[in-house]
Image (cartoon, helix red, strand yellow):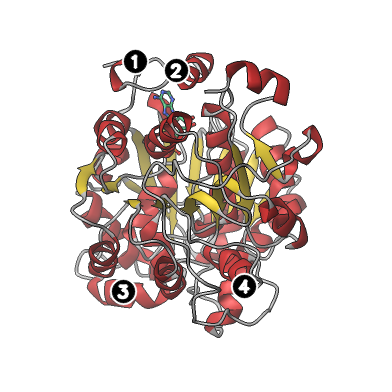
């Protein structure tokens, strides 16, 4: 199957050719035709499967085919994603695939001042990619209305749950027109997520690709039993080995990530950290350094790393093992992208053995394990529990303790819900929005939006950072506008 077979508009096909995409990935082949019909969709897929294009391409096709323009302070497409990084990447994907269309897109994420986002939304945008916390703030400030949303995308719904965003999502959904298309993506489908999908979607088609175990098969995995005290030395040793071209090191907590970076720096190894306590600028700089190869080691927490799309990661190192098996799958999926192979090495201290067993059960594979040797070997006589351990206990705790930066980050002091939301989404401490719907509702004007207000935008080339047209310059875009 080719992208042309999917029936996408020529300017989109051209962008895909320029990106050297030769054929749709399985999720794209399954989802694009369904989304093009206007039907709701549940997509079970992880990052790395091409799921962003699976929703971005048909959405762009819809926008290309309609003359409708966004009303002031409104958007026609709303994409909700749990993290700033993922949101930025989704926006980038829309920009890439939509570069020959004259449509606008902007980002509303925490960690940066809101003023620019308010200004960007003033004239209305075609596509708004937002994290839930910042969107709630913008709604509260009446900087945006959701009355005109034609398509809602909820990406990484299971992470939204882990990060405590589900109530925000429900509030946001309550403000959307009932007549809309909803595309719901999640890597896993725990009961809470299935019930949220049931509330939000109407007669959805369901597509599911790459069950966790099959992604895992591409990655060469091993575990090393090592005492906690031996981990820093073992890490420095491994990173010094040949073949480790670009490594992402996962820790469970933000403080843990900072400690690892300090330890590596002391050992003369350049490394950067990316987690929820870093400013947006710091995260972007760290990612840019990692992408360019300036820094070969990035230390990350699960949530910060979610959705990071960097090619050529040769090694994933689990400095701490996650207590959620799905997180393990997400982590190791950072390597072995696009058909490449990769190596995932998990450090396992005696207290983490139950996590290792739970992971092995989830991926239906045994991970070859060795004991650390030399100076980093576990203390003599340190117990290495076996299968007799009962990881189910940990499993029961999972809902409460998932992720290092979510609502109740494991291993870190529990915080109030608001403070965690702010941390995860960079919120600035403002109160939550009032529950009621803002202003008077105008009726939705049909799915294609033919009766929408005339354009109220006056973008110059200068405002690309705020509301970017997807195309390059107005003149170029006008030449290829649909
Ligand atoms: P995603 O799962 O959306 O995070 O996408 C993972 C990576 O696959 C991104 O780097 C995309 O640019 C790339 N990608 C998506 N679709 C295709 C395709 N059909 N052919 C080649 N690469 C793709």
Estimate the spatial distance between the alpha carbons at disc 4 and disc 3, rounded to whole Å.
Answer: 27 Å
| Residue 270 makes an appearance in the image | no
Left or right: 135, with 395 as reference point: right
For label 1, the residue is 4
Q: Which residue is mark 2?
A: 13
Q: Which residue in the protein does label 4 denote?
A: 422
In three-dimensional space, the C-alpha distance between marks 1 and 2, rounded to whole angstroms, equals: 7 Å
Name the residue nearer the viewer: 80 or 275. Answer: 80
Comes first in the chain, label 1 or label 2: 1
Question: Tag 2: Cα neighbours inside 10 Å, few (<14), some, or many (≥20)?
Answer: many
Please name the residue shown 63% across and 16% down the image.
Answer: 479
In front of the other: 426 or 104: 104
* N-term mark: 3 or 2: 2
**Callouts 1 and 4 close, C-beta under 8 Å:** no
Q: Are marks 1 and 2 in contact (CB under 8 Å)?
A: yes
Which circle, 3 or 2, is nearer the viewer? 2
Q: Nearer the viewer, mark 1 or mark 3?
A: 1
First in residue order: circle 1 vs circle 4:
1
First reached walking from the N terminus: tag 4 or tag 3: 3
Which dot, 2 or 4, sits closer to the camera?
Answer: 2
- Sequence-earlier tag: 2 or 4: 2
* Residue 242: quarter of image: top right
Q: Are marks 1 and 3 in contact (CB under 8 Å)?
A: no
Which quadrant of the frame does ligand 1 lie within?
A: top left
Quadrant of the image containing the N terminus = top left
Neighbour tally class for label 4: few under 14, some 14-19, many 20 plus, Cα within 10 Å: many
């Amino acid at each position: 199957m080719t992208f042309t077979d999917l029936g996408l508009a020529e300017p989109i096909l051209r962008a895909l050719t320029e990106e050297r995409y030769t054929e749709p990935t399985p999720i794209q082949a399954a989802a694009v035709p369904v989304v093009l019909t206007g039907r709701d969709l549940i997509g079970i897929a992880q990052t790395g499967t091409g799921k962003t294009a699976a929703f971005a391409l048909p959405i762009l096709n819809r926008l290309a085919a309609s003359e409708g323009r966004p009303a002031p302070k409104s958007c026609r497409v709303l994409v909700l994603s749990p993290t700033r990084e993922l949101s930025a990447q989704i926006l980038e994907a829309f920009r890439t695939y939509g570069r020959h269309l004259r449509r606008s897109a902007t980002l509303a994420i925490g960690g940066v001042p809101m003023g620019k986002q308010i200004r960007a939304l003033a004239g209305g945008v075609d596509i708004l990619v937002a994290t839930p916390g910042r969107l709630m703030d913008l709604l509260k400030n009446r900087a945006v209305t959701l009355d005109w949303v034609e398509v809602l995308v909820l990406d990484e719904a299971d992470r939204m749950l882990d990060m405590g965003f589900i109530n925000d999502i429900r509030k946001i959904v309550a403000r959307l027109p009932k007549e809309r298309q909803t595309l719901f993506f999640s890597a896993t489908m725990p009961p809470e997520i299935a019930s949220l999908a049931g509330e939000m979607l109407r007669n959805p088609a369901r597509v599911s690709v790459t069950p966790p175990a099959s992604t895992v098969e591409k990655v060469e995995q091993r575990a090393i039993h090592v005492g906690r005290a031996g981990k820093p030395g073992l890490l420095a040793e491994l990173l010094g080995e040949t073949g480790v071209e670009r490594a992402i090191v996962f820790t469970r907590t933000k403080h843990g990530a900072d400690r690892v970076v300090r330890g590596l720096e002391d050992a003369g190894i350049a490394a950067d950290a990316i987690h929820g306590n870093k400013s947006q600028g710091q995260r972007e700089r760290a990612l840019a350094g990692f992408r360019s190869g300036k820094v070969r080691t990035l230390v990350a927490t699960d949530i910060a790393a979610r959705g990071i799309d960097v090619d050529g990661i040769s090694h994933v190192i689990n400095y701490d093992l996650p207590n959620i098996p799905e997180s393990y799958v997400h982590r190791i999926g950072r390597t072995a992208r696009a058909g490449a192979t990769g190596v995932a090495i998990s450090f396992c201290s005696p207290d983490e053995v139950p996590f290792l067993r739970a992971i092995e059960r989830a991926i239906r594979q045994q991970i070859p394990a060795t004991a650390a040797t030399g100076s980093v070997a576990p203390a003599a006589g340190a117990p290495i529990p076996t299968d007799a351990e009962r990881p189910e206990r940990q499993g029961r705790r999972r809902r409460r303790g998932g992720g290092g930066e979510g609502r109740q980050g494991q291993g870190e002091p529990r915080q109030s819900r608001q403070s965690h939301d702010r941390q995860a989404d960079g919120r600035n401490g403002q109160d939550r929005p009032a529950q009621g719907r803002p202003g008077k509702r105008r009726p939705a004007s049909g799915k294609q939006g033919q009766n929408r207000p005339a354009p109220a935008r006056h973008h110059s080339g200068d405002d690309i950072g705020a509301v970017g047209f997807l195309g390059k310059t107005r003149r170029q875009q006008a030449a290829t506008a649909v």
